[in-house]
Amino acid sequence: MEKNVEEPLIYTSRGNLPIASLQYRHEWTENENEIIFAEEYLLDGEIVKRSVHAKLKKSLTFETQQATFE
Amino acid sequence: MCTSFKVELLNGHHALGTSVVRAGTTADTIKAALYLATATINASTTAYTATGESNGAGYSAGGVTVTNATAPTSSSTTAYWTPSASIVYTTITIGATDCVLLYNSTQSNKAIAAFTFSSQTLTAGTLTLTMPTNDASNALLRFV
């Protein structure tokens, strides 16, 4: 009996494509403001899927001040 | 300044100017909209605007609702608040984007804060903005 093995697909700008047909690459970048992880899938050199995970390092700080009576 | 006052500002307890009539006692709905690198969103922004907002497949104007399950609190003399989950835009295709604006959709879309990051394009992908640790040193919004 023949096994029914489905090819894994991934959603892209060109619809669902077999993952095996795509080139995958990723990159980490970090600076004082953020940490970014980006991953890309390419089909014949064209980016058909790009996702980004970002962590912002800097919070917004509101400095409160209170006057004094002299 | 009283630390409790800082927390109560975040909770909408004080109105030192003309107040608004609040619809209820539940937390307001906070949303997060994305903006193109060409947009001008900064500390002068007073409310959500569609001008310069990112657009494309899968992205809805106005952005997404921020998960807010953790009330503002304080530690030592710092009051702080952070969304209780990452802000996620699922399966979107947008051009060069470098800013997210938090705004209060319950209160006439009034702006809260803008955060910038290095310009990113998304192609049928997911943008996940991970929140910092919710404490006095790292929380997203801090009154010190």
Image (cartoon, rainbow, N blue to C red):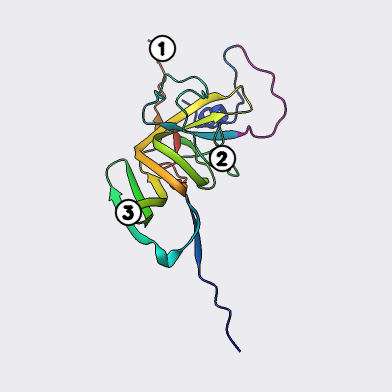
Q: Mark 2: give few (<14), some (14-19) or many (20+) Cα within 10 Å.
A: many
Q: Is residue B107 visible?
A: yes
Q: Amino acid at mark 3?
A: Gly
From the image, state whether disc 3 or disc 1 is nearer to you. 3
Q: Residue at x 56, y 40 (%)?
A: B66
Mark 2: secondary structure = loop
Mark 1: secondary structure = loop
Q: Amino acid at mark 1?
A: Phe
Residue A69 or residue B16, whichever sits in front: B16
Mark identifier at residue A69:
1
Q: Which residues are magenta?
A: B18-29
Q: Amino acid at mark 2?
A: Val
Residue at the spot of label 2: B66
Give yes or no for residue B20 being in the magenta stretch. Answer: yes
Residue A46 placement, left or right of B53: left
Q: Is residue B87 visible?
A: no
Vertical relation: A14 (above or below) B31: below
Kindly give the residue lying farthest to the bottom in the view shown.
A1
